[in-house]
Image (tube, coloured by chain):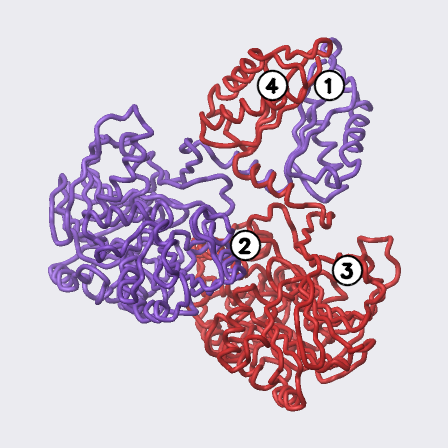
Chain colours: A red, B purple
């Protein structure tokens, strides 16, 4: 029998293979990444979305290991739902030192809640350039650059051939810390022969090259030189190179740096321990201490650059932050751009900060942020270096994969050698062929509170109705003796109308239902309920042009 | 007494003076525009947001007329809520012919629903360049260009001085139809002296110049030349110049054009009647007829470019459009960019169209859309032409006004001569001074169904809780004789958990409540209700880490 390798992207919200990718050789499975997605606006009450582990649950005994490309939530955030739940807690996890630190912090939080889980995670620290073997898979970590340090691409070799998985990447010749991308190694692998390239499609709608992180230096330098008071820089906690740049600018302009926001404190602590941040002695101080210094000596790095209502920056904007009150003279830098879907929230925070008198600087007003993902010319360079036989665009919605595919075709890759997968699709590779052979189930799995996968489409539809027009509950009194309705129903509503202003609407509704029930005097409970719901639904629509959820129940008297 | 002129911006959702601006001279009031805003994501169940008419309601007798700058919804959409409701139905409305046509259609729809309103609107057709008098206000319509034809700026002169209000504008030297902006007249007015400029701030975060509508011609031409089958172009119904461009491209490439979507049909009908569209004979056909022609002879112009779920394009993407089934070979052009907040919806539509095999073309992949608003260099040109003593940035959120103000300061306008107003702020102008003197009440007024202003913060908060975690209603049976709770409560829930998968959660919850009530055996109804709500809220949070709305009611048995 010819050996085959099966590639299966998994994950949520239409991002293909971003959260998880399975490599399957014979019966052996290697998992690449295990991340979460954040819910979209109409996913009422959902905290996070995780990949569908249904297939892995059946095949748990065949999982040889987990490889993690970098420490972002959309690549590591689902590990607590996977380890000890689907695969054994001690399944080996291969990751770079910084990713290991972040994974460890994540898992510790979870394990402290789960007293039933004993043992601990089995983390294997690997650095870029190192290789290791997991079952039939030879894995090599490839140096790339991204918006978190210590991220890698993967070269995964089996007897079927060599696969390159870029992870999230951009080509930054001059990263803030650490080495640049391993261009020559990528070229060497390309010369030796690459069966398939799995390449980051996130930036495939953006022409040209993504600028180096270094372009931010002059913008920050100018802000630090000119700011008349405190400087507050909001960015992603994981964007450690940006934190380093703020530290550098503060050092150059004689300011101390303080941190605000739990995830910023946590991530910086881990990064410092692992030597991923250079902090001159005495530069990093407690927030309380910083606030006692002259304002021109202070810079604060905070979470909340996506406008998240619970994060530190939004609380400063609302005036509810415990320690920091924004005022005229403050300069606030949003060193980020809104992730699609967050535009409204970010705009609100900016407006509120300006209303408090602060000077707010954000892209495109100044060059204070660059993307962490390759633009189109970099995607071309990746293709030109690795010269794959087959291209599998990954990481992105279908539209991004599609744009990536068109770009590859412009470079001469034949359309039939490019595979646009959906999550759950199984791409089977042999030494000289590739085809989609089947589709395993893949659904977005919603996590809400402590429940995983309990909230499905039915509950979501109910929430949508409730969110739009609230509900009216009708309690219909029915004689226990005769089964007949004895009087008009009692109505309770929430989220529908403001009762003080709705006059006698509820009174008239109850009368109308009572009339309808008296006319036909049904005795079957189900008929009473249906008649009541129908009558009230119609009445409210006529009166208000709205459609609250109407629920009738029978109460025995 | 020195004469004064008072300027009062009104409107919704933090866009300053976009929906409405009041000019007040002595007791006389001139209203400029009356538009709506569309709700943000967390404004549950709200259809539209209209300006706060509280002040106008008190002063209705002093309103001399309404001037409309152009026919977009955010400038005319609130007229049905103003005319016949707040000011007399026959209050004169001064607008360009196309705006009059669109206003008339809007008002007719409303008046057909309101049989109690007699009479009709008093529309006065004015063209760019024309002047007219309304009470103490001399008004002149100024030629500008925007993304709807027949838009104007305003020169409003009283004995206090000359005010220029740009309306929504860009400077397009080569518009698709009609004349260009009246540069020389603006310059002449600037030379004669302008007391204050109210200028569109929408594009103040965008550097450079907004391209002319003409840049779209080569992109459309290429698409029409290369498309192997049907072409579907989605754009705003009001973007008539874009519709004209599609008509031109179709004519050049021997295709007919059909329309899809109610507002597209309606707007094109009005525009044709008023001579705002040039349609070669036989080019525009019914959709049904077009679908019977060879696919290479067909172009369809449709609504839904913002991803609105109920619009034609989304229905094509979902496969629920009555007439059009998207398939491989179709080329779909999104001739628009997402309005902030709509990114998720637009992305979903694009992904679904691609999944159906269509080729989807959208910015930035091709130059198929340009903005209708001035970029920073055009805002500078407006300032340079009109040379105002005072600048009042309008149309935009605070951040846009702020960026506009900084730009003006760079051009040498003194900071104290620039007024950043909020909605409801009253700017009082004399011949040589300006100051903010007071603030009248201004709140976002929500329209939901047939209710105007009935939904306030309390109902919205209830909806937010319901949207997140649903509700549980507990009916506690109480003896009519003794006032004692007789048995465990009956629970009804919606939008909380999927009951089939929640096991005995509800059963245990009822038991817990019953226990708590038995221990203390309260007889006061309010105490029973509070005890039940508290016990259940705590129980559900412990069990699920979620917080459904818990409502308890007492039923007498």
Q: Secondary structure at mark 1?
A: strand
Distance from the alpha carbon under mark 1 to that under mark 2: 45 Å
Bin the neighbour count of mark 1 within 10 Å (Cα to Cα): few under 14, some 14-19, many 20 and up: many
Q: Nearer the viewer, residue B382 or B105?
A: B105
Residue behind mark 3: A82
* Res B525 → quadrant: top right
Query: Residue, x 62% and y 24% (percent of image)?
Result: A552
Rendering coords of residue A517 (x, y %): 58, 15
* Res A149 → quadrant: bottom right
> Residue A314 shows which numbered tag?
2
Rendering coords of residue B425 (x, y %): 33, 45
On whether disc 2 and disc 3 are found on a single subunit, the reply is: yes
Chain letter for mark 3: A
Bin the neighbour count of mark 4 within 10 Å (Cα to Cα): few under 14, some 14-19, many 20 and up: some
On whether disc 1 and disc 3 are found on a single subunit, the reply is: no
In the displayed structure image, the side of residue B326 where residue A45 appears, left or right: right
Rendering coords of residue A119 (x, y %): 88, 62
Quarter in which the N terminus of chain A is drawn: bottom right
On whether disc 1 and disc 2 are found on a single subunit, the reply is: no
In the displayed structure image, the side of residue A362 where residue A85 appears, left or right: right
Give the label, 1 or 2, closer to the camera: 1
Distance from the alpha carbon under mark 1 to that under mark 3: 45 Å
- Disc with the residue nearer the chain's start (2 vs 3): 3
On whether disc 4 and disc 2 are found on a single subunit, the reply is: yes
- Residue A398 in view here: yes
Bin the neighbour count of mark 2 within 10 Å (Cα to Cα): few under 14, some 14-19, many 20 and up: many
């Amino acid at each position: 029998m010819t050996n085959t390798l099966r590639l299966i992207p998994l994950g949520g919200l239409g991002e293909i293979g971003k959260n998880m990718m399975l490599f399957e050789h014979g019966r052996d499975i290697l998992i690449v990444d295990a991340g979460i997605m954040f819910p979209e606006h109409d996913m009422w009450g959902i905290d996070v979305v995780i990949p569908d582990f249904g297939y892995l649950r059946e095949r748990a005994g065949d999982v040889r290991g987990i490889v993690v490309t970098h420490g972002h939530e959309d690549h590591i955030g689902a590990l607590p739902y996977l380890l000890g739940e689907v695969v054994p807690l001690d399944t080996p996890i291969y990751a770079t030192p910084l990713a290991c630190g972040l994974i460890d912090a994540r898992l510790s939080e979870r394990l402290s809640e789960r007293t039933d889980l004993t043992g601990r995670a089995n983390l294997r620290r690997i650095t870029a350039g190192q290789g290791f073997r997991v079952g039939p898979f030879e894995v090599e970590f490839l140096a790339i650059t991204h918006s978190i340090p210590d991220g890698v691409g993967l070269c995964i070799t089996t007897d079927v051939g060599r696969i390159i998985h870029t992870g999230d990447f951009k080509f930054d010749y001059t990263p803030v810390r650490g080495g640049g991308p391993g261009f020559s190694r990528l070229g060497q692998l390309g010369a030796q022969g690459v069966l398939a390239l799995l390449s980051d499609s996130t930036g495939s709608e953006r022409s040209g090259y993504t600028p180096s992180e270094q372009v931010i230096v002059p913008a920050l330098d100018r802000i630090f030189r000119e700011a008349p008071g405190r400087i507050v820089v909001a960015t992603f906690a994981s964007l450690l190179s940006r934190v380093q740049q703020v530290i550098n600018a503060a050092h150059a302009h004689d300011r101390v740096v303080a941190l605000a926001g739990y995830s910023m404190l946590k991530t910086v602590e881990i990064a410092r321990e692992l030597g991923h941040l250079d902090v001159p002695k005495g530069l990093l101080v407690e927030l309380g201490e910083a606030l006692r210094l002259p304002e021109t000596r202070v810079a604060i790095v905070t979470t909340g650059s996506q406008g998240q209502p619970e994060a530190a920056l939004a609380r400063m904007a609302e005036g509810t932050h415990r320690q920091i009150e924004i005022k005229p003279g403050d300069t606030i830098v949003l060193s980020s751009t809104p992730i699609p879907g967050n535009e409204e929230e970010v705009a609100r925070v900016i407006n509120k900060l300006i209303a408090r008198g602060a000077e707010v600087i954000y892209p495109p007003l100044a060059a204070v942020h660059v993307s962490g993902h390759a633009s189109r010319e970099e995607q071309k360079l990746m293709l030109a270096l690795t010269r794959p036989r087959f291209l599998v665009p990954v990481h992105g919605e279908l539209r991004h994969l599609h744009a990536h595919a068109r770009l590859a075709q412009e470079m001469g890759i034949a359309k039939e050698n490019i595979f646009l997968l959906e999550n759950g699709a199984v791409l089977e590779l042999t030494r000289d062929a590739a085809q989609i052979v089947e589709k395993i189930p893949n659904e977005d799995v919603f996590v809400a509170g402590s429940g995983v996968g309990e909230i499905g489409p039915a509950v979501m539809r109910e929430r949508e109705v409730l969110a739009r027009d609230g509900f009216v509950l009708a309690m219909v009194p029915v004689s226990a003796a005769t089964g007949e309705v004895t009087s008009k129903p009692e109505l309770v509503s929430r989220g529908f109308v403001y009762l003080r202003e709705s006059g006698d609407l509820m009174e008239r509704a109850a009368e109308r239902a009572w009339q309808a029930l008296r006319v036909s005097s049904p005795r079957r409970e189900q008929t009473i309920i249906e008649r009541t719901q129908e009558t009230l639904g119609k009445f409210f629509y006529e009166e208000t042009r709205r459609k609250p959820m109407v629920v009738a129940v029978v109460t025995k008297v």
